[in-house]
Amino acid sequence: MPDFAFILAGFAVGLIVGLTGVGGGSLMTPILIFFFGVKPYLAVGTDLLFAAFTKMGGTVSLARQRLVPWRVVGLLCAGSIPAALAALWALRHLGPESAAAQRLMTSTLGVALLLTAAATFYKVLVFSPERARAAAARRSAQFAHATAPRHWSLPVLLGAAIGLLVTITSVGAGAVGVSVLLLVFPHLPLPRIIAADIAYAVPLTLVAGLGHASLGSVDWPLLAQLLMGSLPGIWLGSRLVSRTPERLIRSILSVLLAWAGAKLVLV
């Protein structure tokens, strides 16, 4: 029998992701831990595959629209995938159910949520639809050089940092990833930044999620129920996005994420 509470949680997270673009991991992982009492290692592993399957469809759609800057995706993956494998090796060595691994996951998750809250609130203060459209228009003429980073090593190193963060916590590929891309690729139009963030998250979360599955850190029935709710939620959210006060929703989310992050850090 399906647990409709999990389906409803998946639907709510999918709806918010569709409305705001905030990463599902920053919402789903603390919900599973705080509201459903799921152990951190199971919440992280399950949510990684939840993110991989959810974002896979988005990547296909964006690729068909030719919005994905594959050079940027490749540079980020060059850092994030090896870092994810290194983090999985460390978790295997510690044992995902060990006290040390649980402390590492909860404290790092708290920091990741605080970073995501800060990045989300930063976008509330700095960005608006009008400003984003004006910036995209200004940068479109420079697109030939838009995929060139400030320095070749920056996306690789920052991708490695995000890869570690995502593998240990399942959080960081969304709001934090977009903020990093905005800093490293200042001339890349915003739609392509979002497309790059979604596209590089698919192999990263898939590798990390399958690695967690090999450690026994994925609850497959739970994953299926979350996806049953999230897929229609994302579909609905993407169609209501123009009718909702996005800045207000992002502001509330940043406060909730900061609260969850602080609670985990202070545990």
Image (spheres, helix red, strand yellow):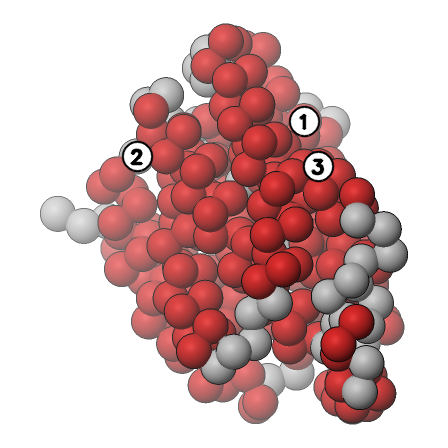
- Which tag, 1 or 2, sits closer to the chain's start? 1
User: How many labels were placed on the picture?
Assistant: 3
The disc, 3 or 2, on the residue closer to the chain's N-terminal end is 3
Answer with mark 3 or mark 1, whichever residue precedes in sequence: 1
Residue at mark 2: 219
Label 3 secondary element: helix
Q: Residue at x 71, y 75 (%)?
A: 190
Q: Which residue is mark 1?
A: 107
Q: Are marks 3 and 1 in contact (CB under 8 Å)?
A: no
Mark linked to residue 146: none
Give the left or right position of residue 179, taking residue 5 as reference. right
Q: Tell me the distance, in whole angstroms, between the alpha carbons under discs 3 and 1.
A: 16 Å
Question: Amino acid under label 3?
Answer: Ala
- Distance from the alpha carbon under mark 1 to that under mark 2: 22 Å
Residue 31, position as x, y percentages in the image? 49, 46
Left/right of residue 43 with respect to residue 131 in the rendered view: left
Image position of 73 with respect to 42: above or below: below
Q: Residue at x 65, y 50 (%)?
A: 75
Instruction: Quickly name the residue at label 3.
Output: 161
Amino acid at the residue labelled 1? Ser
